[in-house]
Image: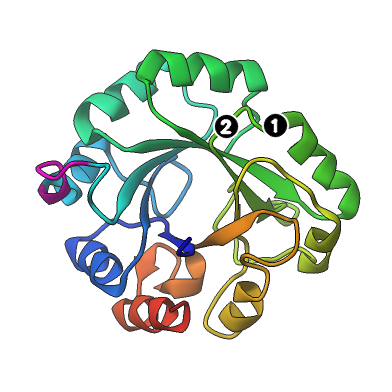
Amino acid sequence: MKQKIKICGLSTPEAVEAAVSGGATHLGFIFFEKSPRNVSAQTAGILTGSLHSQNPSSRAVQTVAVTVDASDQDLDHIVEHMRPDMLQLHGSESVQRIIELKARHQLPVIKALAIREPADLEKVRTYDEASDLLLLDAKPPKGSELPGGNGVRFDWSVLKTLKSKTPILLSGGIDLNNVNEAMDYVGSGENSVIGLDVSSGVESAPGAKDISKIEMFLAACQ
């Protein structure tokens, strides 16, 4: 199976085009007001509009709506205007919340989990099989209001002891300087890591995607 590469925090047509052309498998759009990558549901819908004419099961790229403890009302609005292929829950959502949202929207779910030390991997056991993908991100640094996109990484070596029935995307602090190291964890051992998620690692400033970095990152993942 080809590795999955998600470019997250997209907000411009140029960045979307670079991600699609470069071979990204997932495009992430963030709906969290405190994030410099925040977009409206209408903007996300416009940015992904050209993909809507294609069958989600046949096209190469999937669109992802990234939210943080969003209400039913907010998620209904996002789904109506963006028409995403997947939901990503990046807050403190429970297993029951995942089950409810999958039933409500009939969409697959990515659940993001914050990792800093081996003990944090117990969260994987809690959420294993409840969602369609797990995204392992670094715990935010002290004082940060952002659950992700902080440009920090956790000790990836803890993945060597991880067993999961649910496929995993590795995230947190991945960039052009360490993408080759990160790729070493994809498809190796029993950890079920099937791909990478990058956001700040392909930016020139918080929220400003760098087209050349996106292109180089995706080329390095081939």
Q: Is residue 170 visible?
A: no
SS under mark 1: helix
For label 2, the SS is loop
Q: In which quarter of the image is residue 214?
A: bottom left
Q: Identify which residue is drawn at 19% across, 40% down.
A: 45
Q: Which residue is painted at 23% across and 48% down in the image?
A: 58
Quadrant where the C terminus lies?
Answer: bottom left
Q: Is residue 98 visible?
A: yes
Residue 54 on image: x %, y %: 14, 45
Q: How many angstroms separate mark 2 from mark 1 (CA)? A: 7 Å
**On screen, residue 24 above or below 192:** below
- Pointer 2 local density, CA inside 10 Å: few below 14, some 14–19, many at least 20: many
Looking at the picture, which amino acid does disc 1 mark? Tyr
Residue 220 placed where, x, y %? 46, 83
Q: Do the residues labelled 2 and 1 touch (CB within 8 Å)?
A: yes
Count up the numbered dots: 2
Label at residue 131:
2
The relative height of residue 116 versus residue 41 in the rendered view (above or below) is: below
Locate residue 123, reporting x and y percent: 78, 37
Highlighted magenta segment, given as a residue range: 50-55
Residue 18, picture quadrant: bottom left
Q: Which of 117 and 170 is in front in this view?
A: 170
Side of 203 where 172 appears, left or right: right
* Tag 2: amino acid: Ser
In the displayed structure, would residue 20 be above or below residue 71? below
Residue 52 among magenta residues: yes
**Residue situated furthest right in the rendering:** 119
Residue 113 is a magenta residue: no
Q: Name the residue under label 1.
A: 127
In the visual, does 187 lie left or right of 206?
right
The structure residue drawn at horizontal position 66% and vertical position 76%, both measured from the top left corner, is 184
Left or right: where does residue 25 sit relative to residue 158?
Answer: left
